[in-house]
Amino acid sequence: MKQVEEYEKIFEKYGGMMRTKQLQAEKILYRPLQRLIQQGYVEKVRYGYYQWVDHGNFSEVNTVIRLFPDAVLCMDTALRYYGYSDRTPAEWHLAVSKDSGKSRFKIDYPFVKPHYIEPFVLELGLTAGEMDGCKVRIYDKDRLICDCLRYRNKMNREIFNKAIQNYIADPEKSVSRLLKYAELLRVKKPVNDLIGVWL
């Protein structure tokens, strides 16, 4: 049987998280894997995904992007990222295709909140960001504000108001992009009513 250090090196090769097929390819069989779990070295994140517990650069965001590589960070998570909200969300807000299987989001950890989006606008406003040293897929500020207007009745009033005020004051906003997205996302009227007067 391999030593713990050898298993750790194998997990290290995969960034601290391995899928079942990777474990099989590396010849980490069921019994040794169960022993590593019992000894507290490895934990099962969800079906088919295992991670080394004290992996050096472990972070929740790393787990999220590995479990949901197709998702886009949105709503409260993106508001916090851009400094439009000072509240740390209790869960990761992820935009995914409405054709995505719902069961994949029923996991104990990390806490995720999927937002099911029509596939033709899923990547509208998609940009790249960085969190905890990890590259993330995230909506740009203009798409984010359109989404806030779209779901304003489901949002916390204070978070919504602060997001709109911070966007209006942001020198990096793009009014032309905002209007283009508003047209496609069918929020042109709220954009004009709530933001237009300030632009």
Image (tube, rainbow, N blue to C red):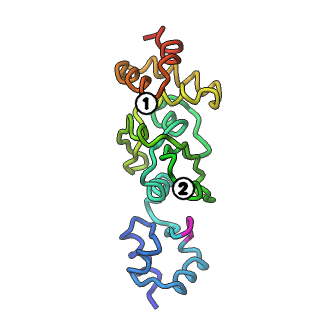
Is 117 displayed left or right of 159 in the figure? left
Q: What x and y, as percent, mark residue 167? A: 46, 22
* Residue type highlighted by circle 1: Arg
Judging from the image, what secondary structure is the residue with disc 1 in? helix
Which of labels 1 and 2 is toward the front?
A: 2
* Residue displayed at 56% across by 65% down: 46
Q: Is residue 173 above or below residue 9?
A: above
* Residue displayed at 47% across by 74% down: 20
The residue that disc 1 covers is: 143
* Residue displayed at 50% across by 28% down: 84
The magenta region covers 43-47
The residue that disc 2 covers is: 101
Query: Crowding near pointer 2: few (<14 within 10 Å), some, many (20+)?
Result: few
* Residue displayed at 40% across by 65% down: 15
Q: In terms of depth relative to the viewer, which is nearer, 127 or 97?
A: 97
Q: What x and y, as percent, mark residue 106? A: 62, 57
* Residue type highlighted by circle 2: Gly
